[in-house]
Amino acid sequence: FGRGGRAAIPMSESKTYDGWEAFTINDAKNLQTPTKGFLCPMSANTYGIDFLAFTIRDHSTNKVIFKAKKPDKVPALPAGFDLDQLRLIEYKFPRSFVECKTIATSLIFRVGEQPVEDFVMVERHYFKGKLIKSWEFTVNFCMPNSTNTWEAMYDMPAMKKELVDEIVSNQYPSESDSLYFVKGKLVMHNKAKYTYFED
C-alpha cells in the first residue's frame, strides 16, 4: 500500500538522515519547496503505525476518486530493494479532482504496542516546485494495538481556469510531502507525485 507505513521486511537502511530528530512540526509547516529526499529513516516509526486503506472522495457528490487497500499478504522484496519506494506513491487523478471544492479522505491505520498521542500530519502540496496549498490534521490519541480511522476534510483553494489547465497539462511537476509526528517527534515521511487527465 503506497501511502506508507511499516515494511513487511527487516529494515536495514544504509542512507543517512542527518538531524532528522530535530525536525519539528513548525519546520514542516515552513516548507516552501519539496524536500529533496526523505527526512527520516523508516525506522523512526517506532510506534508500529501501519496504513491499511485510503479513500478519497468528492465531498459534494460523494463520488470516490481514489481507493487503495494494503494487500493481506505483502510479497517478498528482492535483494537490494530501495525501501524508499514503499513510501512514495504516484496518483493519477481526473481534472474534476483539481476542480473539487472540498475533498474528503478516510485513512484506516493500526498502531503497535505503544499508545500514540498527539498524532499530527502536516501535508504540503507543490506545483512547479513551489508551495500552493497546505493542511494540518491531528488525532489526539490511539490506544495500543488498535485499528483507527482518520477522517479529514480538505477545503480546496480556489484556482483560476488557467492554473487548472496548466496543472492538468502535466508539463510541470505536482508533488507533496506528508510528514507525521507523535508528541512533536517526526516518525514518518511520505511523498507523492500526481498526474492528471481530462474527464
Image: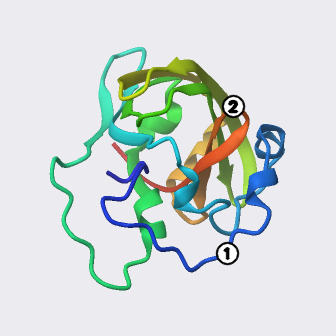
**Considering only vertical position in the picture, is 71 above or below 17?**
above
- List x then y, in percent, for residue 95: 44, 42
Q: Residue at x 70, y 59 (%)?
A: 34
Answer left or right for 172 relative to 57: right
Q: Regarding mark 1 in the picture, which secondary structure is present there? A: loop
User: Toward which corner of the image does residue 30 lie, by quadrant?
Assistant: top right
Whether residue 166 is visible? no
- List x then y, in percent, for residue 84: 48, 68
Q: Which residue is mark 2?
A: 183
Q: Amino acid at mark 2?
A: Lys
Q: Amino acid at mark 1?
A: Thr
- 2 or 124: nearer the eye? 2
Whether residue 62 is visible? yes
Badge 2: how crowded within 10 Å, few (<14), some, or many (20+)? few
Marks 1/2: CA distance?
A: 23 Å
Q: Residue at x 60, y 51 (%)?
A: 176
- List x then y, in percent, for residue 190: 54, 53
Q: Residue at x 15, y 54 (%)?
A: 73
The furthest residue to the front: 113
